[in-house]
Amino acid sequence: MRIEALNKFITLAEELGHVFVATADVNGLPHLAAAGELMLTPEGYVEVTSWFCPATVDNLGVNQNVALVVWDAKTDKGYQLLGKTEKMEDLHMINGYAPEIESKSPVPQVERKLIIKVDTIIDFKHAPHTDTEK
């Protein structure tokens, strides 16, 4: 059942093209980021890849707890995964000055992959619901 629930989460995220990543700093101040690429490892971990902003990276350096949320507002169907970031890997780095990218606003310089051990899977929706694990 757990793998089935994780696959439903990943399938919905792929259909919508995004997932939200919530982290908090050492004082509990939350931060929300968006990511697009997800996959399930053979070991049952979830991998999330994005050009994460510095606040996400800083938060995970002091607090490995993370929540992943995927939600379809049209159908009010969604899931929330709660867990810990087991590892953060650097994948790609911007190499040199790219004025067409960097002149628009500051951008993250490193694409990273988060490897997350999911502890809890719950529904996420606007309608009344409980936080009972799926």
Image: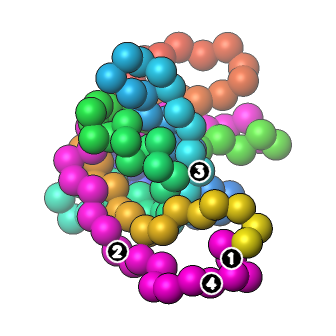
Classify residue 46 by image quadrant.
Answer: bottom left
| Residue plotted at (27% across, 64% down) | 89
Spatial CA distance of label 1 from label 4 is: 6 Å
Coordinates of residue 34 in the picture (x, y in percent):
59, 50
| Residue plotted at (73% across, 72% down) | 103
Spatial CA distance of label 4 from label 2 is: 18 Å
The main secondary structure of the magenta stretch is strand
Q: Are marks 1 and 4 in contact (CB under 8 Å)?
A: yes
| Residue plotted at (39% across, 27% down) | 25
Q: Which mark is residue 101?
A: 1
**Viewed as shown, does residue 67 lie left or right of 90?**
right
Question: What residue is pinned by disc 4?
Answer: 98
Spatial CA distance of label 3 from label 2 is: 17 Å
Question: What residue is pinned by disc 2?
Answer: 91
Q: Which quadrant would the C terminus be assigned to in this image?
A: top left
- The secondary element bearing badge 3 is classed as strand
- The secondary element bearing badge 2 is classed as strand
Q: Are marks 3 and 1 in contact (CB under 8 Å)?
A: no
Query: As shown in the figure, which amino acid type bears the numbered disc 1?
Result: Ile
Q: Which quadrant would the N terminus be assigned to in this image?
A: top left
Spatial CA distance of label 4 from label 3 is: 23 Å
Q: Which mark is residue 79?
A: none
Question: What residue is pinned by disc 3?
Answer: 34
Coordinates of residue 41 in the picture (x, y in percent):
26, 63
**Viewed as shown, does residue 121 lie left or right of 74?**
left
Closer to us: mark 4 or mark 3? Answer: 4
Q: Determine if the magenta segment contains residue 67.
A: no
